[in-house]
Amino acid sequence: MTETPVHPALWPAPLASGAVDATITVPGSKSVTNRGLVLAALAAEPGWLRRPLRSRDTLLMAEALRALGVGIEETVGPDGTGEAWRVIPAGLHGPATVDVGNAGTVMRFLPPVATLADGPIRFDGDPRSYERPLGGVIDGLRALGARVDDDNRGALPMTVHGAGALEGGRVEIDASSSSQFVSALLLSAPRFNQGVEVRHVGAKLPSLPHIRMTVDMLRCVGAQVDEPETGGEPNVWRVSHSALLGRDLTVEPDLSNAQPFLAAALITGGTVVIPDWPSRTTQPGDQLRRIFTEMGGTCQLTDRGLVFKGSGRIHGIDVDLSEVGELTPGIAAVAALADSPSTLRGVAHLRLHETDRLAALTKEINELGGDVTETEDGLHIRPRPLHGGVFHTYDDHRMATAGAIIGLAVEGVQVENVATTAKTLPDFPEMWDAMLTGSGS
Ligand SMILES: O=C(O)C1=C[C@@H](OP(=O)(O)O)[C@@H](O)[C@H](O)C1
Ligand SMILES: C=C(OP(=O)(O)O)C(=O)O
């Protein structure tokens, strides 16, 4: 047998030697951390963000807010335990430049904030950020009274000419390509002179839990929000003009980043405990309890956290993932190892995520011997025996963790650029090793 060549940029994904048995402390949620930073920056008084995620996406958000004049001090919490960020709001100033990297939350949530600054804010980012949809935010802000120069028409790079205030009011947008358009306009709306009424006019709206998260977090800092789920008009959200409170917020663990570890329990017939799994949350990752149970696991919320066990069998699944699109790469990886076919639906918008995730998953799983076809809005996955090879990641953190999941069960998988996991989980390779050697936290 010839040895698989090892390339420095290739990470040999460890093969599981048996059932995993580990407790994994998962760092804070990206989505909660970045919303928390924006809301704290817009508040009328200082606030705390405890157990924030420190990763590329959240450090870019913090750096951008600092560039606009906000104070963000990294420190230990008021009771001396754990890491915390003290956020000190200030008048927002331009000129400034914001690097969005490839963070959807930064490129969408910050342009509305920039309209409140007193000068031009230039937005730029990774090459992929130029291809990700932003039109709903740009057109929405223009309709609300902002001046935006988008040389790339509806995409980055662009300049928001902050005028120190924004009129706000009613706006219609099509958010079918990203729920983040709605979240973006709502998050800054308490600071618009007239607040906002956002009406989504597209055929579908992905990632609804993330919009619920926006509404919940706005209410938590004192904002007045009317929304469809508490008796409001369908597809319409209203946020009133008001001052925001500076709060002391503890960030929940990132349940979407718990996914690869839960998948490891499922694949190896082992047990993984995730401490501090919230009993009530808007995070889409909470739906893993249902999805991975249907795929063969069992789970229980206990005092120790979520206890998830694999049964040694992995079943295929037919599931609409439109609410939880960011879970698709991890589910596809597990489905490729299942005992029956899977159909993943409702995720056409993933073609414009960090990479075209539907094309990337199809190509990379098939190159390992799999049988995946793209549909109009998802994937058909027919499990076949897989073999080793390079799993390319296209600068997509969730492709890297998907490759690691497959590598648990397939010898010789090498994940290209595993460092891309730094977007939301910088310590992933170390955490993965610790899980497999039984030295998990
Ligand atoms: O608001 C958020 O924090 C997010 C919303 C979703 O975006 P899309 O609606 O663009 O899929 C999700 O995929 C992304 O990872 C995080
Ligand atoms: C889609 C994702 O990220 P972003 O916030 O960049 O849209 C993701 O994390 O899966």
Image: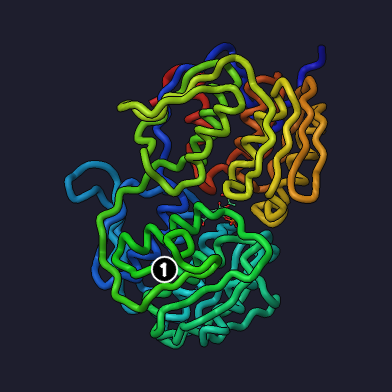
Picture residue at 29% right of the left edge, 53% below the top:
249
From the image, which quarter does the C terminus lie in?
top left
Q: Quadrant of residue 413?
A: top right
Q: Is residue 432 visible?
A: yes
- Respond yes or no on whether mark 1 lies under 8 Å from ligand 1: no
Residue 372 image point, x, y percent: 80, 35
Picture residue at 66% right of the left edge, 65% below the top:
133
Q: In this view, does 11 lie to the left or right of 299?
A: right
Q: What element carries label 1?
A: strand
Residue 279 image point, x, y percent: 36, 38
Dividing the image into four equal quarters, which quarter contains ligand 1?
A: bottom right
From the image, which quarter does the N terminus lie in?
top right
Q: Name the residue under label 1.
A: 226
Dot 1 crowding, Cα within 10 Å, few <14, some 14–19, many 20+: some
Residue 128 higher or lower than 357, as above or below: below
Q: Can residue 434 be seen in this view?
A: no
- Under mark 1, the amino acid is Asp
Residue 126 image point, x, y percent: 63, 60
Residue 215 image point, x, y percent: 42, 61
Picture residue at 52% right of the left edge, 73% below the top:
198
Q: Which residue is more in the foreground, 322 or 7?
A: 322
